[in-house]
């Protein structure tokens, strides 16, 4: 079965001239679908097999210059948890799907409401009242049907968080609750995966990557007990800010999966969109 | 002693820059906060959503000792997602 699938992939592959001028072997979306229908294999598995043959699924061709075939394979094999599918989470999910992450584990307890429409990319007028994870899964299926989505419409708590994110390579914090953030960071440490924090308030944002054993959010929020929120209580959360912070968070996840670049470890990246400035604050490495 | 105060995001408006260098006569964080209030009109203790980091460490108490070359960062708390 596997050998015949690879034969089909090689047979269906075409050659295009990339913008760089290089000739590259590609596999179209239609070909992936046809091979999936004929072989019964999943679209993700077909794309992985193609990449292993040095054939780039056409949808990722514009990734190739920076990510490369080996990098795209790492992304296709990765499993990423996104906790929260609102302002940050919606954009994070969209970007991860377009990058070709293998599986997205999306966790959110909420449904869309009218006051989400100003900033949450997955919220639309006809989605009001629908669970955010359900809308997210539908969006990913339309953007990239070769990405698996495991949707959990549930409240995150101490009793379920470990099992929800188990098996993931990285967990991304798109939450709006300080105590829940701390709980997810603790779980990431227990199961030994990195945790990418992001938060926004007004036109301000912050990003930090926390490795297992790092003090991370404990340095920011202490034990977090009784913390009702931050500046967003006064400044609100207009559009623009979540998109920028979400992009930084996705880039952190990409760096971790590819094993390249410099993660924002022991550094809190602080973004001020009004000033157009970014600075970082050094954080204590260990507790 | 000379210490550095880093201010990020909109907090820098209080100080006219991202980083200020201060010659402080006192010896504790409280002395620094008094100086910032007296000189810049910035009352950290009245700010509900600001954190203070001393050499990258949060949860600092008023009576924490300062030393020559210390780095203090004032960072707004944000929590929306």
Image (cartoon, coloured by chain):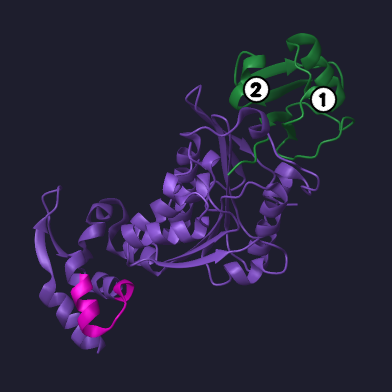
Residue A215 spot, x, y in % from top left: 70, 51
Residue A277 spot, x, y in % from top left: 50, 26
Residue that mark 1 sits on: B45
Chain colored green? B
Mark positioned earlier in the residue sequence (2 or 1): 2
Q: Which image quadrant: the N terminus of chain A?
A: bottom left
Q: How crowded is mark 1: few (under 14 residues within 10 Å), some or many (20 or more)?
A: some
Q: How crowded is mark 2: few (under 14 residues within 10 Å), some or many (20 or more)?
A: some
Query: In the shown orientation, is residue A243 left or right of residue A189?
Result: left
Mark 2 vs 1: CB contact within 8 A: no
Please tell me whether residue A15 belongs to the stretch shown in magenta: no
Where A249 falls versus A5 (above or below)?
above
Residue at 59% across, 26% down: B9
Q: Colour of chain A?
A: purple
Please tell me whether residue A38 belongs to the stretch shown in magenta: yes
Query: In the shown orientation, is residue A65 left or right of residue B34?
Result: left
Tags 2 and 1 both on a single chain:
yes
Residue at 60% across, 16% down: B17
Q: Which portion, as a residue range, is magenta? A: A32-45
Disc 2/disc 1 C-alpha distance (Å): 14 Å
- Determine which of the numbered discs, if any, sits on residue B11 in the image: 2
């Amino acid at each position: 079965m596997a050998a015949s699938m690879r034969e089909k992939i090689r047979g269906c592959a075409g050659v295009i001239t990339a913008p760089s001028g290089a000739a590259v072997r590609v596999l179209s979306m239609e070909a992936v679908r046809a091979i999936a229908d004929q072989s019964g294999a999943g679209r993700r598995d077909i794309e992985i097999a193609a990449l292993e043959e040095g054939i780039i699924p056409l949808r990722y061709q514009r990734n190739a210059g920076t990510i490369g075939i080996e990098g795209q394979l790492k992304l296709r094999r990765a499993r990423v948890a996104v906790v929260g599918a609102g302002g940050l989470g919606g954009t994070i999910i969209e970007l991860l799907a377009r990058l070709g992450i293998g599986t997205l584990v999306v966790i959110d307890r909420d449904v869309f409401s009218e006051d989400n429409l100003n900033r949450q990319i997955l919220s639309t007028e006809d989605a009001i009242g629908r669970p955010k994870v359900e809308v997210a899964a539908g969006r990913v299926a339309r953007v990239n049907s070769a990405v698996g989505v495991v949707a959990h419409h549930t409240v995150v708590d101490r009793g379920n968080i470990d099992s929800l994110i188990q098996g993931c390579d990285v967990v991304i914090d798109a939450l709006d609750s300080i105590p829940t953030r701390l709980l997810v960071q603790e779980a990431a440490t227990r199961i030994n995966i990195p945790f990418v924090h992001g938060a926004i308030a007004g036109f301000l944002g912050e990003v930090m990557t926390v490795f297992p054993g790092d003090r991370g959010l404990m340095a920011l929020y202490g034990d977090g007990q009784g913390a009702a929120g931050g500046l967003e209580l006064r400044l609100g959360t207009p559009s623009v800010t979540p998109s920028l912070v979400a992009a930084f968070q996705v880039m952190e996840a990409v760096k971790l999966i590819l094993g390249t670049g410099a993660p924002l470890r022991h550094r809190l990246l602080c973004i001020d969109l009004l000033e157009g400035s970014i600075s970082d604050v050094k954080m204590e490495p260990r507790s | 002693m000379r210490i550095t105060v880093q201010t990020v995001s909109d907090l820098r408006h209080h100080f006219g820059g991202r980083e200020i260098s201060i010659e402080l006569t006192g010896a504790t964080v409280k002395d620094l906060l008094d100086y910032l209030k007296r000189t810049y009109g910035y009352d950290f203790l009245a700010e509900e959503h600001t954190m203070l980091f001393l050499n990258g460490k949060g949860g600092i108490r008023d009576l924490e000792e300062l030393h020559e070359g210390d780095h203090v960062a004032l960072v707004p708390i944000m929590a929306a997602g």
